[in-house]
Amino acid sequence: MNSSKSNLFLIELILGIMFFAVIAAVCIELFSASYKMEENSSYMAVAVNEASNVAEVARNSGFDNMDAYRDILGMTVESDKAVKTNEYGLTSTITQSLEDENTYNILITDEEEQQVYSLLVKRDR
Amino acid sequence: MSKLKTRHSISNIFPVILFILFAFCIITVLVLASSFYRKTVVATEVNDNVRTAISYIREKSRQTSGVKYAVTECGDTIIFNEGMGYGTFVYAYEGDLMEIFTDLDSSLVPGDGVRICSLLGMSVEEKSSDNVDYLIIDMKTDDENENTIVIEANTGADFE
């Protein structure tokens, strides 16, 4: 009788643990996904701010004034583009569009060179 | 008979051990979940403050006719010219980004400002290139991170 009770308890416990394990796995995954989403959102906020900073300098300095990108934002000026990597590992690049000389493309990429954010800015003619 | 007794003893202890293990797992999962939740809430709050501060300063600089930087009684202060001799003074004070709307010549009391959002600190630097002046605003949003905003400093004649 005693042994039968113990067995029942054991079966109940094993079923409980199995159920708990499944729920726990799902919960942890959901929490980690929400944390990852939050991290991406913070990353995106920084990327948008970086692009806005480049756009602000571009708009006020006549777009193709590479000295302004270097002096104000500390960007490295290469032949046809200005590049800067910030402390978050995001790289901002501004280049003139190949299709339209009055359009400039501000591209923010991460450490794996994947695009995080891009912004097209157009010069008033 | 004695063989049967031994089996009984083990089968009684095993569920108890399993139950203790089960309880330990529950506590571990709860601690992990609360840690994730706390981290997410803190990160959301910091992110929210960063975006509020950045949007506020950027929009204000576009909305007003002039922007300049000065060191006032409130420390590093960005002054937005609202016209008619009035201005909005924006500064960081005791962990918050604050603003005061008052006339441009009056002296400021830091505690009199209206709180906008949390901000640990703000420092402003002026830079210019080809006769265009910029304000480089470094905002310390938490212990680790800083965000920089660049806005055009348009002091113009309105501030005179």
Image (spheres, rainbow, N blue to C red):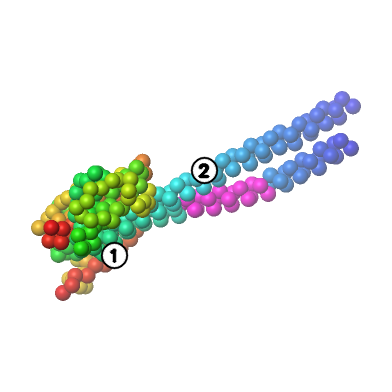
- Identified at 69% across, 35% down, the residue is B20
C-alpha distance separating marks 2 and 1: 36 Å
> SS for tag 1?
strand
Question: Which residue appears at 50% of the width and 50% of the height?
Answer: A32
Where, quadrant-wise, is the N terminus of chain B in this rendering? top right
- Residue A4 is situated, as x and y percent measured from the top left of the image, at 85, 39
- In the rendering, at what x and y percent does residue A56 appear? 22, 61
> In this view of the protein, which residue sits in the foreground, A86 or B102?
B102
Q: Which secondary structure class fits the magenta region best?
A: helix
Residue B59 is inside the magenta segment: no
Q: Which residues are magenta?
A: A19-36
Looking at numbered disc 1 in the image, what kind of residue is underneath it?
Leu
Circle 1 sits on which residue?
A119
Residue found at the very far bottom of the displayed protein: A125
Extreme residue toward the left, this view: B130
Which residue does the numbered mark 2 point to in the structure image?
A: B35
Query: Closer to us: mark 2 or mark 1?
Result: 2
Determine which quarter of the picture holds residue B151.
Answer: bottom left
Residue A33 within the segment the image draws in magenta: yes
Type of residue at label 2? Ser
Q: Check disc 2 and report its element: helix, strand or loop.
A: helix
Q: Is residue A110 in view?
A: no
Asked if residue A108 lies left or right of residue A21, the reply is: left
Q: Is residue B106 left or right of residue A110?
A: left
Whether A7 is drawn above or below A64: the answer is above
